[in-house]
Amino acid sequence: MALTMKMIRTCVPINRVMYTACTHSMSCSIDKEKSFLKSKLHCTNYPPNLFRKSLCPTVCQSAQLRTSPNLWSRPRFSAAAVVEAMPKNMQPYLKLMRMDKPIGTWLLYLPCTWSIALAAQPGCLPDFYMLALFGTGSILMRGAGCTINDMWDKDFDKKVARTANRPIAAGDITQLQSLVFLGGQLSLALAVLLCLNNYSIALGAASLSLVLTYPLMKRITYWPQLVLGLTFNWGALLGWSAIKGSCDWSVCLPLYASGVMWTLIYDTIYAHQDKADDVLVGVKSTALRFSEQTKPWLSAFGVAMITGLTLTGVSCDQTLPYYAAVALIGGHLVHQIYTLDINCAEDCWKKFTENRTIGFLLFLGIVLGNLWKSQETHKGKDLPDHSS
């Protein structure tokens, strides 16, 4: 099998037995590799002079297929590559912040952008200064949350293959070093928070209890994803108050609730990657709670999310682009849930990361909806007054 999987720089045709051997243990994430190998099938009784027309060279490795030099895929820019390019002594701290996996930062940041955009005046773009400020705060607070999580879970992380290489679990950073680093992140996050108004400072400070206690929830309840949702979507409240000076609860509450439902969807999907390890180490999750009933639960959360977004739009006098975006989000969720394979870790990760698209769709819908408001206002002013 090892020889079959490493046909390097040899002119060997792919016959049906070889194809079966190569693809027997391939996971669902590499269907393209199977298709590629299938396209290279040659009959075993081909004469030797046709061997030169076969695939040369072929490399079939567990998670990556490589072919001849002209077919090598070009390296793509990625956050992980940037982290790997940094000085060695910095890398453990960047990985502790999950800078190599920025999807979590996006999922924390996007609810902030929704409320900032909703708070903009009709016909105006969102406040770019606030977007940048909240972006900085999201990086710092997500990093702080990951640091707290890894400090709490270092013993659990050592027992799980996917998390065993995290800096604290692997011994690259000590508990004292991580505590000092956490203090630095929280200090910088506080500096960002102090740039806001007093109402927002108090509101932001109130979220710290959720940040500190969330990692403990998986030990005591099957609903840690709900607590994560309450934590990750705090920006849906904070962004509005940073612009307006206080929260309009008719807008902020349904938006916040929608974000919580959204987190329950994507983090339950994420948790299905680790459900076997979670059982072994004794932690809980909605993935274990819902089990084979995951899709009905996710569908219910999706309906609640769309309902909350609709109520938010009505409270803000939103326009057609906003509701079009909400409809697209509904369609995206239907497809995501319907095609989800909860027993395939690769598919769960793919579906989880697709939720960034949902966040961007809503932000774009809000921005375009605000610009559309301006057009409607001008049309209303241009109409003649027949009251006289």
Image (cartoon, rainbow, N blue to C red):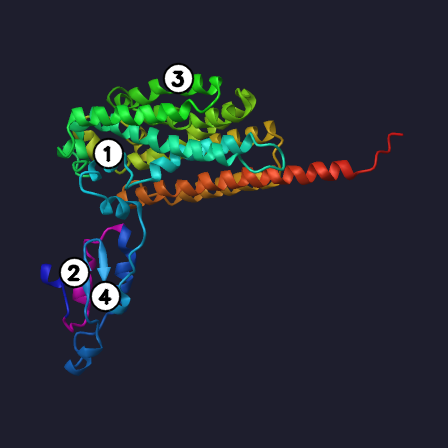
Helix, strand or loop at label 2? It is helix
Q: Amino acid at mark 4?
A: Thr
Which residue is denoted by mark 3 in the rendering? Answer: 206
Cα–Cα gap, marks 1 and 4: 35 Å
First to last magenta residue range: 10-28
Magenta-colored stretch includes residue 18: yes
Cα–Cα gap, marks 2 and 4: 18 Å
Percent x, y for residue 368?
58, 41
Height in image: 197 above or below 114?
above
Q: Residues within 10 Å of mark 2 (few under 14, many from 20)?
A: few
Q: Amino acid at mark 3?
A: Ala
Percent x, y for residue 281?
17, 28
Which residue is denoted by mark 2 in the rendering? Answer: 21
Disc 4 or disc 3, which is closer to the eye?
A: 3
Helix, strand or loop at label 4? It is loop
Q: Amino acid at mark 1?
A: Leu
Which residue is denoted by mark 1 in the rendering? Answer: 96
Q: Is residue 220 left or right of residue 360?
A: left
